[in-house]
Image: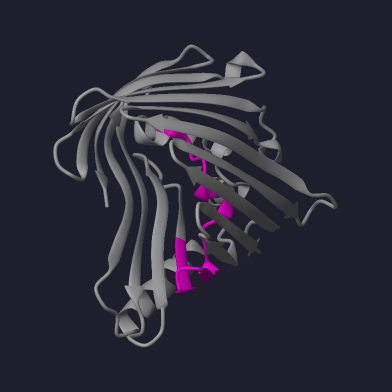
Amino acid sequence: MKRFALIFAISLICALPLRAADWDGFVWAGFQTTDDASGFGFLDVTASFDLSHSYPLTLEVGVYEFVLPDKRPHETYVALAWDDRFRLGVVRPAYDSVLPSKFERIAPYLSYERAEYSRARTTTLALRDGAVPFGLSYQSRPGDWTWAVSAHSARGGDFHSASFAVSYEKGPWTVAAAVEGLWPDHSDGAELNAKAGVTYAKDKWAVGLSFFHPSAHDDPDILALDLSYQATRDLSLYLVSELAENSDFNAHGFGLSYSVSDRAALTAAITQTGNQETAGHFGLSWRF
């Protein structure tokens, strides 16, 4: 199914008179000093291609992928978008549009291992089980508000899902929340994921507090605290802590990012999880 989605995207790109792509996303390449220390990559990228001079119709092709030595867990997105609001195809869940794991920017390997805490079940079923959920989504940005809704159905994953996300930004404050409902074909009931958080950013400081309720993943609730400080024009420091009801599921990390250009930065971090495993993460990141 994933191969079909990729082939479909390539076929559209080759067949249609597209203009230059508009790229958006984040790429990280490096290594981590875990027990099986190895190279590691992370991509969360979308390319948009204009399909018409007369109408706001675009083709979006994207990927959310973790690159490991022996596997490439990923979700591929292929969608037709109208006016950057309506999308049809393999679309990103609205749930993923707010409150991603802060480990993604300093220790992507840990965010892969803990994807169930902050990502939609729709996404993790694609990562772990190869499901390709087709669906549709809508987003709007009225004033200081941003909200999105999406619905998905995956034969390969035997489930249907829907999610809603909203955020509000005013001055130094940002408040966000999201909920996802999942209806597996093998179950009569619905499963639920939810999250909410607030961030305060002022001058060189930013502090965030979030709560994650990954019930559909059968994981414990998590309270997350993140702190960042821009020490110099090019150097930023990060502190991330995720606390669970059961300390075995805790995770903590300290990292830094040093900008080498407007888009590229060297990153380094040290993390520790509840099982007392300590790891280092070193890489080069790019933002599009």
Is residue 257 placed above or below 16 in the rendered structure?
above
Q: Which residues are magenta?
A: 77-103
Q: How is the image coloured?
A: one colour
Q: Is residue 140 left or right of residue 32?
A: right
Evaluate whether residue 33 shows in this view: no
> Looking at the image, which residue is at 61% across and 30% down?
211
x%, y% of residue 143?
Answer: 50, 57
Asked if the magenta segment contains residue 34, the reply would be no
Q: Quadrant of residue 46?
A: bottom left
List the single residue furthest toward the bottom: 54
Residue sitting at the far right: 188
Looking at the image, which residue sits at the far front?
A: 171
- Give whichever of 65, 162 is nearer the camera: 162
Instruction: Give the image location of residue 185, x and y in percent.
Output: 76, 57
Front residue of 276/181: it is: 181
Q: Residue at x 66, y 28 (%)?
A: 221
* Location of residue 223 (image quadrant): top right
The image shows residue 61 at horizontal and vertical percentages of 39, 65
Residue drawn where x is 27% and y is 52% of the image: 288
Q: Is residue 146 left or right of residue 63?
A: right
Q: How many marks?
A: 0
Q: Is residue 271 left or right of residue 14?
A: right
**Magenta stretch encompasses residue 80:** yes
Towards the viewer: 82 or 170 = 170
The relative height of residue 241 versus residue 146 in the rendered view (above or below) is: above
Kindly give the residue lying farthest to the left in the view shown.
260
137 left or right, relative to 45 = right
Give the x, y percent position of residue 241: 48, 21
Residue 163 appears in view: yes
Q: Is residue 28 above or below residue 53?
A: above
